[in-house]
């Protein structure tokens, strides 16, 4: 569509310029000998200091009239061009959506104005300009031009309205798609959660436990840890933390293969704190008698079955002095430093409520509690096996072993020249590994 700009109606400068051009064209004619003599005589008169140089009043009025006629002619010219412009805008607007009547109307206006322009051209070439009421002609032409401009703006307004409606419909469609995607995600999440809960069926006896049950629930536990780490990183970014500096403090001297790999450093830090004391009952070092060891398998399995289908915040409210509540409180105070909490939330209200056993329903704490629940249940499940599940981590600069390790940075297996690198070194352990009798569950490591 023709681009329409806001144009000031005044055309005085254009009118004066074109009037000069037309005036030059009028006076560029051949002069007869008599006219030359007359001009020479006029020059002599004008050189006479005793004679007046002013034109007679009749000639002056005629010159003003001629100027007004030419300005009226130019006004008609501009008015006709503005009408064509408006009609062309209407013609394009009527094409989408298709409007046969609108197209025909615009086409007729364009043809009519082109004929009008042709007539104006002939009048100018034959010097037959309309000299009747030039002032009225000019005013009418300017009115016509203003109407054409207004018409153009109306068409542009309609065009913008159509585009706005189209965008609104696109937004509505995308919102519906987003809502559908969210519903699908919730459905998948529900299925995944139910899969995690059914990793150990409700009616299974203690003797029916197998490593496959532990491996399935470990997968759900790792997902909960990573969900909390993602939330922690978002909170740190919102609070203006330097994530690169923080990752360097957690794992000094480590060069990450990709910028987003620094999340593994935060995940490693969380796992270190949360899995500390995993091999000990209730995460606390305590001497046990042989009879207590024989009883605790069933005890921890019962704890696992009791908590696995309960919302962690509800369980904390029901049993604020339970072993899980103690674990949750202790790990929160260890993992979240007071300065970190003050930086992320602006206060220490959550810390005070955790200390007092009155838990706030804050999104950050709920995410932590969900992670703590999965790790606590994994701990209970580990102590339900015979022999018990043991946890292990790999020390820094250890050689990579496919038996005990799973790499989170496959880039380490390629050297700078593109060849395969044999036995890269471990930078740090992200997620610990486990042993169930002769079954080894690999730890997840980040390689140099």
Image (tube, rainbow, N blue to C red):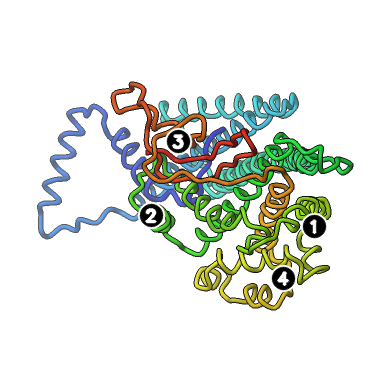
Marks 4, 3: nearer the viewer: 3
In-front residue for pair 238/167 = 238
Marks 1 & 4, CB-CB < 8 Å contact? no
The quarter of the displayed image where residue 71 is located: top left
Q: Earlier in the sequence, mark 2 or mark 1?
A: 2
For residue 360, which numbered disc appears in the image?
4
Residue 254: percent from left, percent from top:
36, 47
Q: How many marks?
A: 4
Going 54% across and 36% down the picture, which residue do you hit? 80
Whole-angstrom CA distance, mark 3 to mark 2, is 17 Å
Q: Is residue 352 visible?
A: yes
Residue 273: percent from left, percent from top:
55, 58
Whole-angstrom CA distance, mark 1 to mark 4, is 14 Å
Q: Earlier in the sequence, mark 3 or mark 1?
A: 1
Where is mark 2, residue-wise? 248
Whole-angstrom CA distance, mark 2 to mark 1, is 35 Å
Where is mark 1, residue-wise? 311
The quarter of the displayed image where residue 34 is located: top left
Where is mark 3, residue-wise? 409
Residue 352: percent from left, percent from top:
64, 78
């Amino acid at each position: 569509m023709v681009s329409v700009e806001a144009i000031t109606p005044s055309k005085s400068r254009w009118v004066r310029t074109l009037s000069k051009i037309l005036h030059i064209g009028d006076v560029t004619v051949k002069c007869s000998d008599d006219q030359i003599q007359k001009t020479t005589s006029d020059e002599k008169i004008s050189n006479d200091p005793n004679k007046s140089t002013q034109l007679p009043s009749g000639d002056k009025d005629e010159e003003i009239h001629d100027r007004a006629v030419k300005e009226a002619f130019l006004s008609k010219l501009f008015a006709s061009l503005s009408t064509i412009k408006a009609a062309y805008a209407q013609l394009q607007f009527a094409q989408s959506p298709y409007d046969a009547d609108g197209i025909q109307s615009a086409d007729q206006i364009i043809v009519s104005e082109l004929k009008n322009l042709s007539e104006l051209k002939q009048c100018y070439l034959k010097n037959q300009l309309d000299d009747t009421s030039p002032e009225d002609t000019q005013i009418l032409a300017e009115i016509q031009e203003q109407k054409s401009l207004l018409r153009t703006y109306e068409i542009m307004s309609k065009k913008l309205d159509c585009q706005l409606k189209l965008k609104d419909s696109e937004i509505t469609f995308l919102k519906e798609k987003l809502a559908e995607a969210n519903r699908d995600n919730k459905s998948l999440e529900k299925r995944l959660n139910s899969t995690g809960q059914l990793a150990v069926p409700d009616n299974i006896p203690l003797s029916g436990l197998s490593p496959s049950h532990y491996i399935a629930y470990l997968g759900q536990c790792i997902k909960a840890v990573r969900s909390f780490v993602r939330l922690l990183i978002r909170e740190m970014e919102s609070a203006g933390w330097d994530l690169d500096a923080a990752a360097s403090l957690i794992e000094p001297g480590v060069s990450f293969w990709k910028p987003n790999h620094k999340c593994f450093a935060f995940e490693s830090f969380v796992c270190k704190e949360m899995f500390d004391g995993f091999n000990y009952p209730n995460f606390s070092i305590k001497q046990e008698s042989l009879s207590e060891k024989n009883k605790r398998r069933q005890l921890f399995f019962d704890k696992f079955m009791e908590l696995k289908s309960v919302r962690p915040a509800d369980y904390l409210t029901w049993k604020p002095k339970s072993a899980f509540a103690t674990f949750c409180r202790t790990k929160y105070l260890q993992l979240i430093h007071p300065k970190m909490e003050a930086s992320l939330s602006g206060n220490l209200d959550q810390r005070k409520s955790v200390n007092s056993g009155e838990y706030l329903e804050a999104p950050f704490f709920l995410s932590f509690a969900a992670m703590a629940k999965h790790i606590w249940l994994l701990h209970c499940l580990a102590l339900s096996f015979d022999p018990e599940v043991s946890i292990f981590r790999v020390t820094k600069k250890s050689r990579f072993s496919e038996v005990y390790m799973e790499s989170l940075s496959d880039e380490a297996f390629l050297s700078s020249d593109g060849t395969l690198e044999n036995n890269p070194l471990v930078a740090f352990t992200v997620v610990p590994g486990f042993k169930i009798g002769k079954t080894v569950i690999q730890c997840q490591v980040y390689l140099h």
